[in-house]
Amino acid sequence: NAVVHWFKRDLRIADNKALRLASEKAKSKNVPLICLYIVSPGDFKAHMTSPVRVDFILRTLEILREDLAEFDIPLYMETVDKRRAIPERILELCGSWGASHLFANVEYEVDELRREARLTRLAAGRGIAVEVVADTCVVAPGELSTGAGKQYAVYSPWFRAWLAYLKAHPHHLNLIEPPMSNPESARNNFNNLFDVPVPEAPKNKSLTEEEKKRFSSMWPAGEHEARARLHKFVTERIKKYKETRNFPAANSTAVISPHLASGTLSTRTAVAAAQDANSTKKLDGGNEGTAGWISELGWRDFYKHVLVHWPYVCMNKPFKPEYTDIEWEYDQDLFDKWCNGMTGYPFIDAAMRQLRQMGYMHNRARMGVASFLAKDLMIDWRMGERYFMENLIDGDFASNNGGWGFSASTGVDPQPYFRIFNPILQSEKFDPDGDYIRRWVPELAGVKGKAIHDPHHRGATGVKAYPQMCVDHKESRNRALARYKNGLGRD
Ligand code: FAD
């Protein structure tokens, strides 16, 4: 007899709703709680999960297993190749443990909702109660609607409604208690589940030994690290966030997105910490940096709400159907130049090389490279969206899809299509001293002054190894304007 919690993208003990509910259920039935994690190569493949993210998840599982053991809770881990087989296998395991209840936090992507529906259906036939609860967002999708009862498709009014909701229901920011310890009998009855090894990464998603070392020192895993990062940010940098957030060289953002994506940190914990750091002890008002950071966390919830209300965004369709017929390019050579940071535009190349080296890219740089791919190269934004997922350590479908839709002007509340970033002006504005470029583009490390933004046209010497611009921005801009207008059927 047991109760089971199924971990997915909620790899933490602190502030985890389904885990706590599972623990309470186990306590009330006086049976042990068993935790479960399924590694699914098929799932990684279907969702283009990057090797660096897989590595981050597996390292997190090591830590989670140790932390749970302190509560006498085992973490059973297993590889299930095909993702369609996951519900069946989970129920088999529940059956073998005599489990009566299975808990999990909901994930909102279409595939995941279908999987959970199937699991619940199959479980009902076997006398296992499944409880899938809403914990991923601070305010659950469905809670906010316009006066006309519709879902918001524009961020600002949605965010005002989000703030108003949290002010009216402040308990939504109360952090959830950790699970209770298992009775001692858990060790006797389920002893074999306590030393299950963390599964290996699938071959097509594994890192080399050198990469493993590099990424684990760059990105320590686990919820303790996540909370330490959050604490450092809210005590040292949050107040200056508004002035500094747009400068990729400034090291001024929280860099917690890998933790939010894997669930080693809940968004609620982050919002509550920021509220606490605000001079007003409120979500808005007070310090501008703090309020601004909370609003950025809001985007994360917003994009999840969007995919719940417009699930076709999960199916490779633009949020704005009127943008379906834009004529895109599929030029592999240009796409490779973009991927490899060899476009000849230093700011774009620095960003793409940061992604390669770190599995991460600053938000301003993400906007720059996404606009460059979609508008300067006119390459189908979905190729960029996919490349990001294949390489990001913080790959999150909703935020990534939302970010690409914003930059390509095809998404929800996007950049207007005629707003086309000039990659050199962006560079001068957001990397004025060229430090970001020098850090990531070694061929340009020795270039002094403003020549760094356009070395071949500004007389920089010793930069022969750095490529010439792969397109002319002025010409590309005109082409993009024409294609967007044409796609929209406008003159
Ligand atoms: P901070 O500036 O410290 O912000 C704190 C948190 O707020 C972030 O960790 C993130 O969870 C949230 N946030 C901030 N900006 C955004 C935003 N624009 N949209 C949604 N949430 C936001 N974020 C991801 O987590 N995963 C992705 O796959 C992803 N893909 C993106 C693709 C594109 C094209 C763009 C333009 C943005 C994308 N973002 C994505 C959003 C954003 O770039 C990152 O969340 C941010 O850079 C993470 O760094 P940070 O933790 O230091 O952010």
Image (cartoon, rainbow, N blue to C red):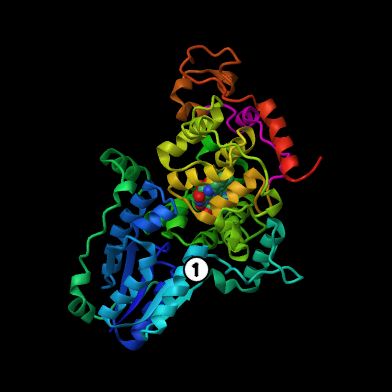
Q: Is residue 343 above or below residue 375?
A: above
Please state which of residues 434 and 101 is positioned toward the viewer in this rendering: 101
Magenta run includes residue 420 = yes
How many numbered circles are shown?
Answer: 1
Quadrant the N terminus occupies? bottom left
Residue 73 position in % (x across, y down): 28, 72
Label 1: how many Cα within 10 Å (few below 14, some 14–19, many 20+)? some
106 displayed left or right of 62 = right
Q: Is residue 301 visible?
A: yes
Identify the image quadrant of residue 5.
Answer: bottom left
Mark 1 Cβ and ligand 1 under 8 Å apart:
no
Identify whether 443 is placed above or below 234.
above
Whether 36 is among the magenta residues is no
Query: What kind of residue is marked 1?
Result: Leu
Q: Position of residue 75 (x, y in %)?
A: 28, 68
Residue closest to the eye, 331 or 365: 331
> Which region of the structure is painted magenta?
415-435
Q: Residue 248, position in %: x, y?
A: 54, 37
Q: Secondary structure at mark 1?
A: helix
- Left/right of residue 338 with respect to residue 24 in the rendered view: right
Q: Residue at x 39, y 72 (%)?
A: 178
Q: Position of residue 201 (x, y in %)?
A: 30, 52
- Residue under the image location 61 percent in, 74 percent down: 169
Q: Is residue 263 above or below residue 363?
A: below
Position of the C terminus, as image quadrant, is: top right
Q: Is residue 181 visible to us here?
A: no
Q: What residue did someone put label 1 on?
A: 113
- In terms of depth relative to the viewer, which is nearer, 24 or 105? 105
